Amino acid sequence: MIATNAPMSTLEPGGPPLPDDGLSIDIVSNGNTLSLVDGLPVLRDADLITQVQGRTATVKVGKSTVDLPSGRKITLSNGVFEVPDKHPKPSPARTRFRAEGNADAAAELLTLDRLKDAVEYCARPLRPPRARSPPRSRSTTRSPAH
């Protein structure tokens, strides 16, 4: 469902802020493939609930799979991507998700070029041949959404 109750100027780039009741979008979809960040593997078979209310956007990912270059897999679930106010540029964004997979897959993901700088501070980084336990993690990030 998509509904709008706002002046056209609020929907144009550079226009005034959209009122809270100016736009409403609700979309439920299954089996999606998402390429969220250049240099990271796509999310496959993603179940999504997308909601926009005024300037606030939320995308919930029920479950999806990340296929790594080696063929290893990581399952992501309970994912949420939130942009609480889309008007300021860049807009603040929050991401939360749960990841499950074997330790080799987690180590491989963390060694991808796009993530190397983010995990450089780790005192004892994971290395695929040495990692043995099945990790589960919850992750939360804050970043600007462009």
Image (cartoon, helix red, strand yellow):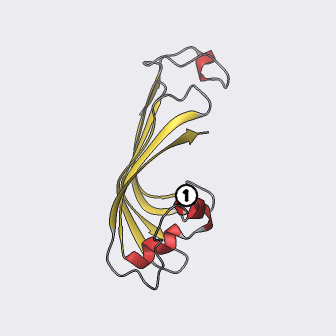
Kindly give the residue lying farthest to the right in the view shown. 14
Q: Is residue 75 above or below residue 48?
A: below
* Residue beneath the point at 57% across and 25% down: 87
Which residue is nearer to you in this view: 140 or 64?
140
Q: Quadrant of residue 88?
A: top right
What is the x, y in percent for residue 25?
44, 32
Which residue is nearer to you in this view: 131 or 92?
131
Q: Is residue 97 above or below residue 14?
A: below
Which residue is nearer to you in this view: 78 or 44?
78
Kindly give the residue lying farthest to the bottom in the view shown. 129
Q: Quadrant of residue 50?
A: top left
What is the x, y in percent for residue 6?
52, 16
Label 1 secondary element: helix
* Residue beneath the point at 59% across and 60% down: 117
Q: Quadrant of residue 90?
A: top right
What is the x, y in percent for residue 146?
62, 39
